[in-house]
Image (cartoon, helix red, strand yellow):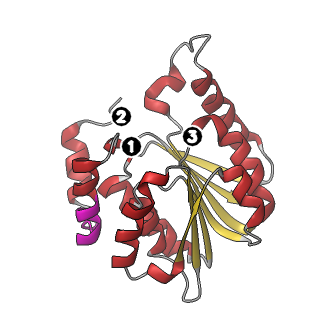
């Protein structure tokens, strides 16, 4: 679902910060070689992630769902001088692709890749986080939230992607549509949990910003 017209989307993108050349290269190669390239954050959302990270100035960032590393590099732009970014993904085939672009960036030594199930890896990280980006399998969004809340610093920010789920959140949900029901439950959780304050933005497929109180 397109929440705004293509023309308006083009205008918004043209009047936002330019896409850095390294990310433009990553974008192109993802579309050329990788399955489901629409999973990429892309120019506009990438600049949103970059801007939020620069405003927050996190020391530690956690990303759940790396894909080809586009959002990873956008988030890294706001890292503090001694900061670090942990990114988790289950796809072994993308590890070298990600690393190639991480190593070309200014944040090569700050980005640590973790391969495996996020719910198993998160307890082993032994860090407190200022910024977390959730963009992995939607069926585990609620589990991810409960896993990261205890390791968030006060004032920390949780970003959740795809929370409008192509507009399915407004449709009559089919009985066998487990994922949409989980997204609906997750959105309700973010609105009602007293530990956070939340705003949902209709950016691309929906991006929620939740601040730990």
Does dot 3 land on a helix, a strand or a loop? loop
Real-space CA distance between mark 1 and mark 2, rounded to the nearest whole angstrom? 7 Å
| N-terminal-most mark, 2 or 3 | 2
Query: Reading the chain from its start, which is encountered first: label 3 or label 1?
Result: 3
- Residue segment shown in magenta: 17-26
Q: Is residue 46 left or right of residue 26?
A: right
- The spot of residue 90 in percent (x, y) is 55, 50
Residue drawn at the location 81% of the way across and 60% of the way down: 150
Query: Mark 1 highlights which residue?
Result: 204
Which residue is at the front of the view, 156 or 85? 85
Q: Nearer the viewer, residue 10 or 140?
A: 140
Q: Nearer the viewer, mark 3 or mark 1?
A: 3
Residue 23 falls inside the magenta stretch: yes
Q: Is residue 181 above or below residue 7?
A: above
Between tags 2 and 3, which lies in front?
Answer: 3
Note whether 165 is above or below 128 in the view shown.
above
């Amino acid at each position: 679902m397109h929440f705004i017209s293509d023309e308006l989307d083009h205008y918004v993108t043209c009047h936002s910060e330019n896409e850095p050349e390294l990310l433009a290269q990553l974008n192109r190669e993802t579309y050329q070689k990788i399955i489901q390239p629409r999973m990429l954050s892309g120019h506009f959302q990438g600049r949103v992630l970059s801007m939020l990270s620069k405003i927050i100035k996190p020391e530690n960032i956690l990303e759940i769902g790396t894909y080809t590393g586009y959002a990873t590099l956008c988030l890294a732009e706001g890292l503090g001088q001694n900061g670090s970014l942990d990114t988790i993904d289950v796809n072994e085939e993308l590890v070298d692709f990600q690393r190639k672009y991480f190593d070309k960036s200014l944040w090569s030594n700050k980005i640590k890749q973790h391969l495996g199930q996020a719910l198993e890896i998160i307890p082993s990280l032994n860090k407190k986080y200022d910024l977390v980006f959730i963009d992995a399998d939607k069926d585990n969004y609620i589990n991810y939230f409960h896993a990261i809340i205890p390791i968030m610093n006060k004032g920390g920010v949780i970003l959740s992607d795809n929370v409008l789920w192509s507009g399915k959140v407004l449709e009559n949900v089919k009985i066998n549509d487990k994922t949409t029901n989980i997204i609906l439950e997750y959105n309700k959780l973010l609105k009602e949990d007293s530990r956070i304050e939340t705003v949902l933005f209709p950016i691309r497929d929906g991006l929620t910003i939740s601040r730990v109180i």
